[in-house]
């Protein structure tokens, strides 16, 4: 999609969040800041809800510090040092003399300790927190203890059991379930009306069913259908989404990985996982399907064996991006 993503241009306010319980909890947290853990399935709207909380609570958007854990803990020292969010915290000397673990701990502490731009506190979002190793969780616990007056910590995760007890005990739990088809249709209807897109109820229901409880996928799916210029009906939605696949990009991703162009391969992976909201298991399944026409014999057996290990890790809630990125790196190494 070349146009601005509807997930960004139609980001919900607190009042527009579709789940009543989430609205109530986050409204209270905007009035009296407390640490939160939002937990629920992928695509349920956890991150969008936290961003809505921050817009309600703060006058400056700079008082929301957003860290995607899957990316953050997978960064190299060089990537951390060059990231504009963190570069001011990291001197050349510290980068040279500090381990990666020490550098991550330093960034966490500095992100929490610098003063808010306006108001009395800032909000720190740790997104996809199931990817945090236990030693880093211990460091996070200490940061939360030391900065509880100046920072509100909000953690989102698909797997709350992966969090250590001292962190859980410092946060109020907020369950976020997958939206119902009716809730998804209501969100889509508000967006398409604002966009001036013609639609009918059956078309929106098809898009909602296609997304299967993933609100981000539903919104991007509706945008895909609308960009055809014929409105959103059952017929146009089926034509645009019924045969949607990722085969060509999977093929390009594999070719880049095999040729050692890991950055290009990971860029395609990020487009699928982040921009278009595909689940890691879906990408892995399509990758294996495409691989059957590219490999045979021992190479294919080895790939399936490695994919089985990754599928287990994905089931346990570890980072889709890190696990699939490692598979691409392995292909390049081979």
Image (cartoon, rainbow, N blue to C red):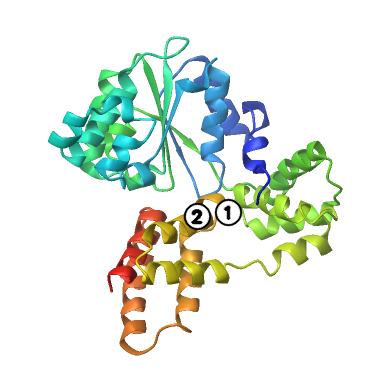
- On screen, residue 149 versus residue 61, left or right, reads left
Residue 143 marker: none
Most distant residue in the left direction: 97
Locate residue 77, reporting x and y percent.
25, 41
Residue under the image location 34 percent in, 47 percent down: 131
Position of the C terminus by quadrant: bottom left
What separation in Å lies between label 2 and label 1 (alpha carbons)?
Answer: 6 Å
Question: From where the camera sits, is residue 18 visible?
Answer: no
Locate residue 281, reporting x and y percent.
46, 64
Question: From where the camera sits, is residue 153 visible?
Answer: yes
Q: Hey, which quadrant is residue 322 in on the image?
A: bottom left
Residue 273 marker: 2
Viewer-closest of 298 and 21 = 298
Q: Are marks 2 and 1 in contact (CB under 8 Å)?
A: yes
Q: Residues within 10 Å of mark 1 (few under 14, many from 20)?
A: some
Viewer-closest of 133 and 247 = 247
How many labels, in total?
2
Residue under the image location 39 percent in, 48 percent down: 159
Dot 2 falls on a residue whose secondary structure is helix
Residue 276 marker: 1
């Amino acid at each position: 999609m070349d146009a601005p993503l509807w997930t960004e241009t139609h980001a919900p306010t607190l009042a527009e969040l579709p789940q009543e319980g989430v609205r109530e909890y986050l409204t209270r947290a905007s009035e009296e800041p407390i640490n939160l853990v939002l937990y629920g399935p992928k695509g349920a709207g956890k991150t969008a809800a936290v961003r809505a909380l921050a817009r309600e609570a703060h006058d400056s958007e700079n008082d929301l510090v957003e860290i995607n854990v899957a990316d953050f803990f997978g960064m190299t020292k060089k990537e951390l040092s060059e990231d504009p969010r963190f570069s001011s915290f990291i001197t050349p000397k510290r980068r040279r003399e500090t381990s990666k673990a020490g550098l991550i701990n330093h960034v966490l502490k500095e992100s929490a300790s610098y003063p808010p731009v306006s108001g009395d506190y800032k909000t720190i979002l740790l997104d996809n927190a199931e990817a945090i190793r236990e030693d880093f969780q211990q460091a996070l616990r200490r940061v939360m203890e030391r900065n509880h007056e100046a920072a509100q910590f909000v953690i989102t995760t698909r797997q709350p059991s992966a969090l250590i007890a001292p962190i859980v005990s410092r946060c109020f739990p907020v369950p976020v379930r997958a939206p119902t088809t009716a809730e998804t249709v209501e969100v889509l209807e508000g967006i398409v009306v604002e966009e001036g897109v013609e639609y009918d109820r059956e078309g929106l229901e098809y898009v909602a069913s296609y997304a299967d409880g993933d609100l981000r996928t539903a919104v991007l799916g509706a945008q895909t259908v609308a960009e055809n210029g014929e409105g959103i009906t059952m017929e146009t939605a089926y034509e645009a989404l019924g045969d949607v696949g990722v085969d060509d990009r999977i093929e390009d991703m594999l070719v880049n990985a095999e040729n050692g162009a890991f950055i290009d391969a990971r860029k395609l992976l990020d487009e699928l996982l982040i921009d278009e909201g595909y689940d890691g298991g879906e990408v892995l399944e399509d990758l294996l399907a495409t691989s059957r026409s590219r490999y045979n014999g021992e190479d294919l057996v080895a790939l399936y064996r490695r994919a089985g290990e990754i599928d287990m890790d994905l089931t346990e809630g570890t980072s889709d991006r890190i696990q699939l990125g490692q598979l691409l790196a392995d292909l390049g190494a081979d």
